[in-house]
Amino acid sequence: MPIWIFRFATLLAFPFLTYDFIRQDWMSVLEGVLCGAIVVAGEVLFKRLRLIKIMIVCTGFLMGYMLFALLDYTIVRFEHTDALAWWLIYGSKVKIGLLIFGVLASILKSRELEGLSLKGHHLKVADLTALVDGRIVDLCEINFLPGVIVLPVFVMDELNKMASSSDPLERAKGRRGLDVAVRLQELSEITVRITNKNAKGNTPEERVVRLAKSLDAEVVTLDFNVNKAAVLQNVTALNIADLATALKPVVLPGESMSLFIMKDGKEKEQGIGYLDDGTMVVVEDGRKYIGKRAEVSVYSILQTSSGRMIFARTK
């Protein structure tokens, strides 16, 4: 409400000021209204711009002015008659041109930053697999991934290609990834930034890892290849699949449990059951308990890159 009072007062005050202090006619009133409108428009624009954008524009303006000052000093010190004469005629135009060039160059280059003016491990670059999987949203909701989630534009472009694919499965993955990106932006627990900054690489995995390296950031992924590339580039990779594996219930050899035997195994008299987290349990002599719940005792645990397998026998 106060901001609207300020805007209304500005539009009302400028016509009175121009009418009283400049000249008393309708033209001065119109000029006052125009000046008030310019001030209000400037206030609205300034409010919508982020501080980093304003600083970037000011830096570009300063860079253009420094180029002009350097050129002016060089021509004056050169003391060439024709150059000085040309400079006196066109110097002001060159100054305006350099100032505009500095501002435009800073605005264009600022697109590579897009809110990433800071670097560090508070930045987490999400790759394609993390967005398609979707569990990154749950981790962000419980503040398990604090900081800023960075969504590279080339990853979003890949999701758009998948969403428009003729393959139904590929199309479903692409649409899910886009939905997850939208849900991330709607979360109040984290900040999400989409960056146009790119990185060179032969594969999308390499590009994601090198982008994270340039930002001194971490990579959020489910891709084993991204893990390997991150190790080579000395980048921290947060693999959600590894996290899920690490959080599975601990089962020790010799421990007993009640297990529902679902089907028979590959070997004779074997039965297969599953824990609540999906871990497969191979039960010796469990075939006769298929479709029933049996008491089993764990005697061996096998950990593989694809998951964990538990071996047990009926008690």
Image (spheres, rainbow, N blue to C red):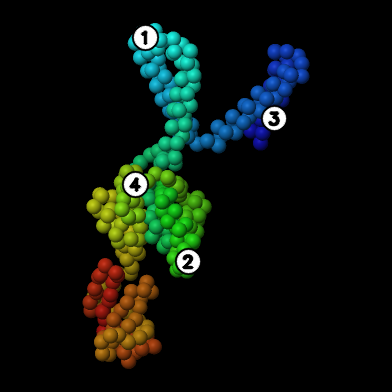
Q: Nearer the viewer, mark 4 or mark 2?
A: 2
Vertical position of residue 262 compared to residue 183: above or below:
below
The residue that mark 1 highlights is: 80
Q: Nearer the viewer, mark 1 or mark 2?
A: 1
| Mark 1: secondary structure | loop
Query: Which corner quadrant of the image does residue 82 belong to?
Result: top left
The residue that mark 3 highlights is: 8
How far is mark 1 from mark 2, CA to CA? 69 Å
- Residue for point 33% across, 68% down: 248
Vertical position of residue 296 compared to residue 307: above or below:
below
Instruction: Identify the amino acid type marked 3.
Output: Phe
Among the two numbered marks 1 and 3 on one chain, the one whose residue lies closer to the N terminus: 3
How many C-alpha atoms fall within 10 Å of the one at disc 3: few (<14), some, or many (≥20)?
Answer: some
Q: Nearer the viewer, mark 2 or mark 3?
A: 2
Q: Nearer the viewer, mark 1 or mark 3?
A: 1
Q: Are marks 1 and 2 in contact (CB under 8 Å)?
A: no
Among the two numbered marks 4 and 1 on one chain, the one whose residue lies closer to the N terminus: 1
Residue 278 in view in this figure: yes
| Mark 4: secondary structure | loop
Among the two numbered marks 1 and 2 on one chain, the one whose residue lies closer to the N terminus: 1
The residue that mark 4 highlights is: 199
- Residue for point 32% across, 55% down: 203
Among the two numbered marks 2 and 3 on one chain, the one whose residue lies closer to the N terminus: 3
Instruction: Identify the amino acid type marked 4.
Output: Ala
How far is mark 4 from mark 3, CA to CA? 49 Å
Residue furthest bottom in the image:
288
Among the two numbered marks 4 and 2 on one chain, the one whose residue lies closer to the N terminus: 2
